[in-house]
Image (cartoon, rainbow, N blue to C red):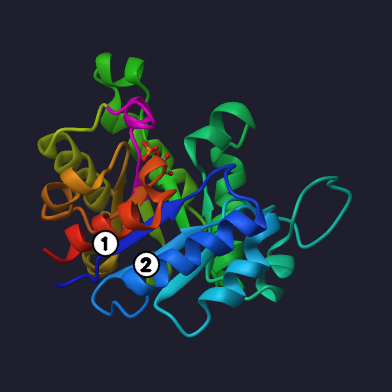
Amino acid sequence: MSRTPFVAGNWKMHKTIADAEAFVSGLLPLAGDVDDVQIGLAVPFTALQAVVDSTRGSAVRVYAQNVHWAEHGAYTGEVSIAMLDELDVHGVVVGHSERRQYFNETDADLRKKVPALLAAGLEPILCVGESDAQREAGETEQVLRTQVVEDLADVADEDLAKVTVAYEPIWAIGTGKVATPQQAQDACAFIRSVIAERFAEQAAQVRIQYGGSVKPDNAAELLGLPDVDGALVGGAALEPASLAGIIDGARA
Ligand code: 13P
């Protein structure tokens, strides 16, 4: 089963519209016509329209970093799926550990968000991952199982491969402490096996990214692992040359 590698940059709370446009101007000459790696940028709400417009016709797909599950309603400060769809985004990153930790996003929320995105034709990038304490306590697989099972519970079996899963161990995010190839492979293979308990064919197709301190110099090794189909990149996705270096790693 060959899965197209998928490298996405997550800008988190970085870049004004002007910064975002400067980034795209730098990235497109380096990676704008790559066709053997899917490229994504997860962009702050305020710069989404500008990045959708400036990447149109290129290989770069644009993602939001959060969404509410309700169609509309009294949810001050939230953004709906229809609002994002209208901007022509390709998908949305959901369940990032920063949103789970600091903004109280729960598996119950994700259980609603993921199928709602699919129903609108948008691609969810569902983030899962264990903390340092959970890994130390030997709970990694249990934590991953709970997140994967609960967050995908209301996705139809035949739609499972429309979701991208990002395995992001919390202890590797922004720390420079990258998972070893064995740790990354084991966790991504485990996630695939949990999905296979529902539908083996879909599990063979679903893309699973690794995220956490991915850099141009470690990308090729991580992306070459059998169950790692791409990367979700934070700090190293803030500069075009660095993200392009990781995209090159996915082609190696
Ligand atoms: P870093 O690449 O900065 O470790 O961040 C990873 C991440 O959280 C991507 O979503």
Alpha carbon separation for disc pair 1 and 2: 8 Å
Q: Identify residue for label 1.
A: 247
Quarter of the image for residue 211 reads top left
Residue 211 in the figure: left or right of residue 217: right
Specify the amino acid type for callout 2.
Ile
Specify the amino acid type for callout 1.
Ile
| Residue 141 placement (x, y as % from top left) | 27, 32
| Residue 28 placement (x, y as % from top left) | 41, 72
| Residue 174 placement (x, y as % from top left) | 39, 31
Q: What stretch is highlighted in magenta?
A: 166-176
Circles 1 and 2: CB atoms closer than 8 Å: yes
Q: State the residue at coordinates (27%, 47%).
A: 191
Residue 157 in the figure: left or right of residue 99: left
Residue 175 visible, this angle: yes
| Residue 86 placement (x, y as % from top left) | 71, 75
Residue 195 visible, this angle: no
Residue 33 in the magenta stretch? The answer is no
Where does the C terminus fall, quadrant-wise? bottom left
Q: State the residue at coordinates (77%, 49%).
A: 78
Between 41 and 154, the one lying in front of the other is: 41
Q: Identify residue for label 2.
A: 39
Label located before the other in sequence (1 or 2):
2
Residue 93 in the figure: left or right of residue 47: left
Q: State the residue at coordinates (45%, 56%).
A: 125
